[in-house]
Image (cartoon, rainbow, N blue to C red):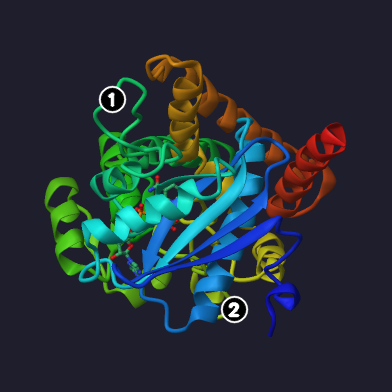
């Protein structure tokens, strides 16, 4: 397979491969679209089995960022960086400094922030060599870790879905959370505070035990989360949680979580719809983090301090957009992900047409 034939390529504007022999950095940066503004999206570090897997992930995530940013109504396009390597053993300051030089070489067409395997302290090294790094701590425009804002948006989205599909509040509702890392753990805390019961899993047993100790969650083995007796399934680990093997096992009537690319294929989204399950499209419900990052980029551009009220207004608008998607799915009798794709593609196409 060549890059341009990849099913995930889908009209990317730019795809870059960077190698830094000194630090060992191997990194791909994919820029799907800059029609709505400079591209922005997290940087992920993962021990991919092959470079082709890394490329496919970068392309899929970058396109999803275009859609996510369009739906979040922020003036940013979609891009994504992936670093090939094990984040538990291969992180060094030099690696992230090399990442900063790579990002800087794109002259602001891509803004990096955190994603799986990366923290604000890692990005501080990248920031030494590039101003196009967001999600930092310690300066007036800084927005810090985006995960709590992502979790807040997911929490509000789950509450909306529960109100609509189950006609009740979260008190006593059972939510099964796959992955209790940054987003999943904050989400578990919010749901617990709202009276929800939790079933959780994580391949990192320590992370699961910590969350269970403070929320009373029932911990199950990672593979068993798909069989959990629950009202809501919240994927908060990696992509592809909803697939032909897992969907027939799922008992919840609602799927709403923080992970990117939850549907293994578009066809499985259709099967979710046919099964009568309410699916909150991932890139609509998990936009809180990139909204927080956009708040930092906006503050840097205006030479102002970070404005949490602007972020709150955009997160509230994001939940209204989710409601619009759910309404249209009913009125048009189509799966929610198809409705969301159509709205996002329309917004990007309009911006493309406007820039000529
Ligand atoms: P994280 O690395 O902190 O957490 C992911 C957790 O999932 C880890 O604890 C990991 O051990 C666990 N995990 C991995 N594979 C698993 C499996 N098969 N079964 C159970 N647990 C598994 O990452 P995060 O920042 O919490 O992001 C989680 C998801 O949300 C990712 O898909 C990410 O792209 C997406 N997301 C994150 C943000 C954000 O603000 N951090 C924003 C939008 C989307």
- 129 lies above or below 82: above
Q: Is residue 206 left or right of residue 192?
A: left
Q: Is residue 54 left or right of residue 135?
A: right
Q: Quadrant of residue 10?
A: bottom right
Q: Secondary structure at mark 2?
A: loop
Observer-nearest residue: 173 or 176? 176
Q: Contact, CB < 8 Å: mark 2 with mark 1?
A: no
Query: Tag 1 or tag 2, which sits nearer the N-term?
Result: 1
Quadrant containing the C terminus is top right
- Which residue carries the number 2 mark? 244
- 164 lies above or below 263: above
Nearer to us of marks 2 and 1 is 1
Q: Quadrant of residue 55?
A: bottom right
Q: Is residue 297 left or right of residue 348?
A: left
x and y percentages locating residue 131 in the rendered image: 42, 36
Q: Secondary structure at mark 1?
A: loop
At x 84%, y 46%, the residue is 332
Mark 2 lies within 8 Å of ligand 1 (Cβ measured): no
Observer-nearest residue: 341 or 302? 302
At x 64%, y 55%, the residue is 63
- Which residue carries the number 1 mark? 139
Quadrant containing the N terminus is bottom right
Q: Is residue 249 visible?
A: yes
x and y percentages locating residue 186 in the rendered image: 29, 43
Alpha carbon of mark 2 to alpha carbon of mark 1: how far? Answer: 46 Å
x and y percentages locating residue 30 in the rendered image: 59, 59
Q: Which corner quadrant of the figure contains ligand 1?
A: bottom left
Q: Is residue 229 visible?
A: no
- 111 lies above or below 266: above
x and y percentages locating residue 184 in the rendered image: 33, 51
Observer-nearest residue: 285 or 335? 285
Q: Which mark is residue 192?
A: none
């Amino acid at each position: 397979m060549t890059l341009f034939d990849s099913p995930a390529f889908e009209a990317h504007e730019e795809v870059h491969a960077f190698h830094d022999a000194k630090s060992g950095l191997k990194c791909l940066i994919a820029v799907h679209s800059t029609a709505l503004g400079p591209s922005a999206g997290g940087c992920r570090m993962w021990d991919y089995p092959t470079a082709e897997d890394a490329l496919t992930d970068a392309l899929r995530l970058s396109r999803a960022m275009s859609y996510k940013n369009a739906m979040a109504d922020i003036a940013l396009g979609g891009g994504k960086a992936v670093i090939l390597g094990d984040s538990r053993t291969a992180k060094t300051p030099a690696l992230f400094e090399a990442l900063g030089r790579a990002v800087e070489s794109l002259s602001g067409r891509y803004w990096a922030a955190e994603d799986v395997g990366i923290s604000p302290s890692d990005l501080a090294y990248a920031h030494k060599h590039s101003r196009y790094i967001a999600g930092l701590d310690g300066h007036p425009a800084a927005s810090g870790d985006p995960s709590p804002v992502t979790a807040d948006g997911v929490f509000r989205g789950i509450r909306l879905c529960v109100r609509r599909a189950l006609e009740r509040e979260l008190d006593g509702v059972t939510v099964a959370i796959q992955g209790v890392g940054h987003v999943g753990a904050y989400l578990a805390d919010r749901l617990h505070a709202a009276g929800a019961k939790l079933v959780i899993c994580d391949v990192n047993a320590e992370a699961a035990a910590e969350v269970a100790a403070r929320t009373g969650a029932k911990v199950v083995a990672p593979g068993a989360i798909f069989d959990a007796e629950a009202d809501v399934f919240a994927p908060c680990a990696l992509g592809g949680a909803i697939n032909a093997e897992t969907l027939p096992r799922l008992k919840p009537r609602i799927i709403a979580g923080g992970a990117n690319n939850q549907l293994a294929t578009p066809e499985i989204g259709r099967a979710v719809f046919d099964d009568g399950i309410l699916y909150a499209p991932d890139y609509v419900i998990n936009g809180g983090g990139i909204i927080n990052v956009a708040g930092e980029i906006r503050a840097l551009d205006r030479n102002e301090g970070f404005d949490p009220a602007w972020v709150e207004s955009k997160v509230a608008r994001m939940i209204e957009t989710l409601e619009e998607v759910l309404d249209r799915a009913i009125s048009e009798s189509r799966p929610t992900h198809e409705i969301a794709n159509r709205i996002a593609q329309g917004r990007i196409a309009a911006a493309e047409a406007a820039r000529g």
